[in-house]
Image (tube, helix red, strand yellow):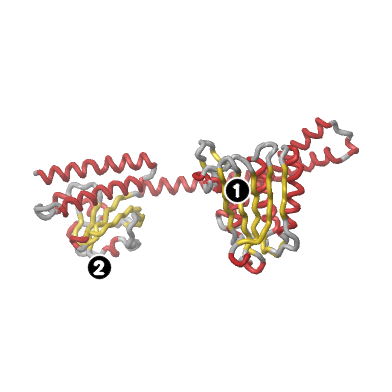
Amino acid sequence: SRRGAYWALVFAVTPLLALVVAMVFRHVVYGFLAATAWLQAAIVWELAAPRRTPLDRAELFELTPDAMVVAAPSGTVLDANPAAARLLGQPVRALRRKRLEELLPQLTASSRPQVTHLSRSDGSTAALLVGQSQLKSHHAVLYTMRDVTAEAKAEEDVLKKSAEVKALVHYVVHDMKNPIGVLQGSLRTVIDDPNLGELTVGQRKFLENAYESCDKALGMIHSLLDVNKLEAGEFKLNLEPCRFDEIVKQVLVQQEDLCRRKGQRLEALLPEHFPLVYADPEILRRMVQNLIANARKHTPRGSQIKVALYKGGDHDRWAVLAVADNGPGIPPEDREKIFERFVTLSNGKIKTGLGLHFCRLAALAHQGKLGVDSELGKGTTFHLAIPFQAEAPSR
């Protein structure tokens, strides 16, 4: 019949649509969403079409490859198709006498697809991806189900492998700290100890560059280890009242020589008698160091970097550090991406640095915030806000 051909076409297209969408977006959930939306649109069109006979269950339910269950708002199953009977392990007649919560106890009312679990008679458990939509004209809810046990198992295996690799990287990176620290200490001794012989200008410059590279490597190691802990919620801050202005001064002394080598000017505007902040002084120092180093990295030779510390926010609740440069600026579409761990920017380059990602996580751990303002061709300003001692975060 004409209606039979219509539903045959609908259900023939459904798996193809699901497969194509899943391949394009590389996730089975998107394929399921597309297939569900397609079926729901077909059903709504059929129900809304004028001068049509009521839907025949055999035409609709017999042909679909997906399990479909229609339930009353109270949860009583009104109807199910053969695919649902096979999936749930019970005949259609038995399903009609059940309540949905008996079949799928973990299922909740939601407009979004959700993964729930089905206990089978053989003791095994299946993972089901369930979508639900209201059939207002029939005062019922349509549940579309698909067995995603294999996909869920594959995803679990991937996550397990990822956790193992992450743990291995953590141990390797952690073990790199000592040898790099020893190398850095040895370089400092060769540079500073006159008893080892006088260095030529070229030799000193070479050793200073090697020392700076070790310092960068140690900074990256500490950032990677701390980022992993911050993301896992395992990082413990050593909070205490501390002088934000003094920490900034100490970092400026370290960064001035590096800026001078690159022909950059480093200017600072620091107020006197600045109030205390409640923070981890070592983490705060690293945040300041990362922000100034980031400006130095992205600012050309001969440019200027400005550092300012001031009170900000409602009723001056925040200690705000602004680090501004007159570099090329950041495109609007990249201004949030730069705070992510690994991301591809709009120019096609892959950002792998951890400095800004660490700073954002560390600021949030202090109940603070880190933001950016930028204008292409004019420069960029980062704003790090930390609460004063009166706004101390809880331990």
The spot of residue 250 in percent (x, y) is 75, 52
Left or right of 154 on screen, residue 222: right
Q: Which residue is mark 1?
A: 356
Viewed as shown, does residue 59 lie left or right of 119? left
* 47 lies left or right of 304: left
Closer to us: 284 or 235: 284
The vertical placement of 267 against 209, above or below, is below
Quadrant position of residue 311: bottom right
Taking the spot 32% from the left edge, 58% from the top edge, the residue there is 111
The residue positioned 49% from the left and 48% from the top of the image is: 160
Identified by mark 1, the residue type is: Leu
Where is residue 105 drawn, in percent x and y? 33, 63
Q: In this rendered view, identify the residue nearer to me: 323 or 13.
A: 323
For mark 2, give the secondary structure. Answer: loop
Residue placed furthest toward the front: 378
- In this view, the residue farthest toward the bottom is 390
Mark 2 vs mark 1, foreground winner is: 1
**Which residue is labeled 2 in the image?**
74
Q: How many marks?
A: 2
**SS under mark 1:** helix
Alpha carbon distance from label 2 to label 1: 51 Å
Q: Residue furthest right?
A: 195
Q: Is residue 395 visible?
A: no
User: In the displayed structure, would residue 353 be above or below residue 81?
Assistant: above
In terms of image quadrants, where is residue 95?
Answer: bottom left
Q: Residue drawn at (38%, 44%), measured in percent from left and top?
A: 27
Q: Residues within 10 Å of mark 2 (few under 14, many from 20)?
A: few
